[in-house]
Image (cartoon, helix red, strand yellow):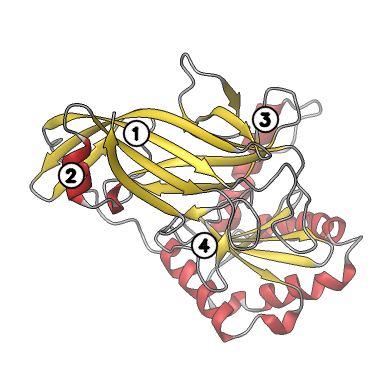
């Protein structure tokens, strides 16, 4: 690996880091030694003010040899765990009383001990941990599954599907009610979010929008968490194929099996941004086909009525199910 120049620029530093990471994954002893030294210093700083949580991280690291080759890479606030292919888990001391084990499980929905993950590296779900003995057989099973899913090569790409013919455009109206207020603390002992807003996710052309740092879309027409209600209206293109309806358009997210409209929750500090901490899915693919048939008729539209506060009094998140979300066709 090349030596660091006397006055390196950022591009040079990035190249050095990529070379080091690549060499470590290839098993280079010198690169592995340098990574361990650097990671040890960073990890110590992460747990300096929360020493009772360090045994939780150590217990996770102790489980890694049974999985297979793993590269441990400590960044400023997280510890990433990578297979020879890519990152499969991260460990983050999220609060002074909790460590989050984030797992990259692209096809697994939150449920049970698996909670939605936001701002935890590549993780899609997380398991909150407060003590080493909570890393039980179930947690180790999820860790193994995340490793296996991210160690295997990706499946071969299917030939591109021919788009189904367009049969019309739906007007979708989202009516939100029962908002949670301007402050919330979704996790016990976690961050208290201030001046929270909810917004539709999508492009911001000709609409009031806030920037979501690091996000691929904007927060459209944000509404304060203390508002009596929230309302958004968007167009959705409807296609009909051999296997049923499909939905496309600038506000539609997800692949063919997960088409949905998205809502984003975040703090609004007043600088033109929405600092995302959770999101919600309104899945179009879950709507009864009879409702779509009726809503696409002239003079009709598709309505979504959604309760925006969950059973714990926090912003609703992840995939929203009835009775919190009701779809219907109504006069346009």
- Is residue 160 visible from the viewing direction of this image? no
In terms of secondary structure, where does tag 1 sit?
strand
| Closer mark to the observer between disc 1 and disc 4 | 1
SS class of the residue under badge 2? strand
Residue 288 relative to residue 310: left or right: left
Q: Which mark is residue 172?
A: 1
Q: Position of residue 289 (x, y in %)?
A: 19, 49
Q: Which residue is mark 2?
A: 245
**Mark 2 → mark 3, Cα distance in angstroms:** 49 Å
| Residues at marks 4 and 3 touching, judged by CB atoms closer than 8 Å | no
Q: Quadrant of residue 246?
A: top left
Q: Residues within 10 Å of mark 1 (few under 14, many from 20)?
A: many
User: Tag on residue 83?
Assistant: 4
The first of marks 1 and 4 along the sequence is 4
Q: Can you give x and y, in whole percent of width and height, for residue 298 in the image?
A: 17, 27
Residue occupied by mark 3: 12
Q: The residue tagged with tag 3: helix, strand or loop?
A: helix
Q: Which is more foreground, mark 2 or mark 3?
A: 2
Circle nearer the viewer, 4 or 3 = 4
Counting residues from the start of the chain, the first of labels 2 and 1 encountered is 1
Where residue 69 sits in the image (x, y, percent)? 54, 69
């Amino acid at each position: 690996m090349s030596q660091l120049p006397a006055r390196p620029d950022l591009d040079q530093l990035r190249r050095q880091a990529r070379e080091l990471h690549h060499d470590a994954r290839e098993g280079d002893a010198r690169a592995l030694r340098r990574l361990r030294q650097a990671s040890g210093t960073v990890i110590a700083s992460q747990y300096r003010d929360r020493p009772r949580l360090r045994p939780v991280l150590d217990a996770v690291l102790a489980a890694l040899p049974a999985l297979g080759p793993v590269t441990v890479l400590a960044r400023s606030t997280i510890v990433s765990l990578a297979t020879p292919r890519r990152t499969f888990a991260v460990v983050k001391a999220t609060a002074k009383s909790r460590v989050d084990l984030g797992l990259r499980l692209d096809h697994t929905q939150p449920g049970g001990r698996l909670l939605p993950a936001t701002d935890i590296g590549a993780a899609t779900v997380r398991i909150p941990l407060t003590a080493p003995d909570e890393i039980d057989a179930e947690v180790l099973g999820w860790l193994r599954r995340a490793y296996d899913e991210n160690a295997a090569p990706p499946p071969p790409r299917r030939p591109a599907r021919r788009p189904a013919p367009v049969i019309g455009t739906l007007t979708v109206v989202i009516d939100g009610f029962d908002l949670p207020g301007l402050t919330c603390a979704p996790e016990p002992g976690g961050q208290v979010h201030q001046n929270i807003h909810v917004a539709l996710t999508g492009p911001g052309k000709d609409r009031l929008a806030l920037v979501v740092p690091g996000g691929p879309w904007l927060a459209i027409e944000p509404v304060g968490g203390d508002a009596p209600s929230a309302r958004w209206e968007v167009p959705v293109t409807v296609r009909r194929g051999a296997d049923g309806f499909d939905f496309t358009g600038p506000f539609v997210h997800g692949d063919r099996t997960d088409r949905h409209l998205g809502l984003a929750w975040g703090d609004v500090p007043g600088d033109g941004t929405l600092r995302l901490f959770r999101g919600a899915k309104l899945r179009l693919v879950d709507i009864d086909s009879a409702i779509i048939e009726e809503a696409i008729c002239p003079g009709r539209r598709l309505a979504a009525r959604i309760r925006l506060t969950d059973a714990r009094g926090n912003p609703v998140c992840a995939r929203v199910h009835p009775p919190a979300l009701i779809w219907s066709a109504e006069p346009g």
